[in-house]
Amino acid sequence: NNTFTGNLNINQGVLSISAGAGVGGARGSATTNAITINGGTLQATNGAATITLPNNAGITVGASGATIDVASGITLDYPAQPISGTGALVKNGAGTFETDEGTASSTYNGLTLNAGALAFNKSSGGLGAGSLTINGGLIRTTGASARSPNNPSILVNADFTLGSPTTAAISFANGGAWTLANGNRTFTVDTITATITGVIGDGGSGYQMIKAGSGTLALN
């Protein structure tokens, strides 16, 4: 296990870890830029079922963006801090990236979900402060408290799932517009109630919106 407590910068390529201490030891106090990703990828693979990043080791997304890649069967747990920065975050891999932002809101500018699960525990900023692009995967809360992401716009490029058993309701209640793109799109709602208040459009393309899953989708 690594024990350094200085900052880690990932500017190119991939940094692969199999334990949380791969990015260093716990910081003595909250450090927003303990892990700065600016054009590179933090990959979680070949480790325990849950890899927990060190306490107080905050992630900052640089202007060139950041990618989090989590292998199948693994949960990468980011405890009790927001994700800050000006760039956009991309989630790759079939595993789960689980964030617990604590009392503050994440400020990174835009989220793209390509695969796997993104679990969040904050309403404002829980899925970032910018637009949300869905290219597949699952979005759910980390626990039993309902959450309300405030993304200003959501682009749906692929079928996706909201919620899972034992997780909570998700309400996209700020009125951000949803756009169906590149074909018919299936919204699977698993067990929970998901609410969308924004307009759902397709740019006049005539794409179908398909509701699947045992949960409730409320369009307000």
Image: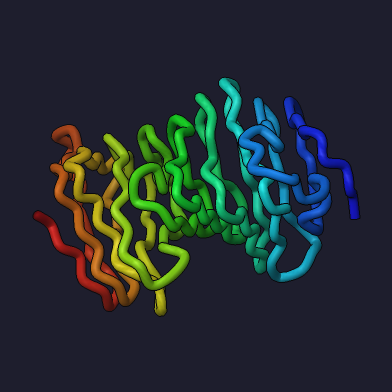
For the N terminus, the image quarter is bottom right
Splitting the image into 4 quarters, where does residue 156 fall? Answer: top left
Residue 13 rendering spot, x and y as whole percentages = 76, 32
Q: Identify the residue shown where x is 25% and y is 57%.
A: 171
Say if 185 sits above or below 85 in the image: below
For the C terminus, the image quarter is bottom left
Q: Please state which of residues 20 and 101 is positioned toward the viewer in this rendering.
A: 101
Query: Taking 23 as reference, is 107 left or right?
Result: left
Query: Taking 142 as reference, is 11 left or right?
Result: right
Q: Identify the residue shown where x is 73% and y is 53%.
A: 54
Residue sitting farthest toward the front: 28
Query: Taking 45 as reference, is 58 left or right?
Result: left
Residue 70 rendering spot, x and y as whole percentages = 65, 54
Query: Taking 6 as reference, is 54 left or right?
Result: left
Q: Identify the residue shown where x is 37% and y is 62%.
A: 161
Splitting the image into 4 quarters, where does residue 49 fall? Answer: bottom right
Residue sitting farthest toward the top: 63
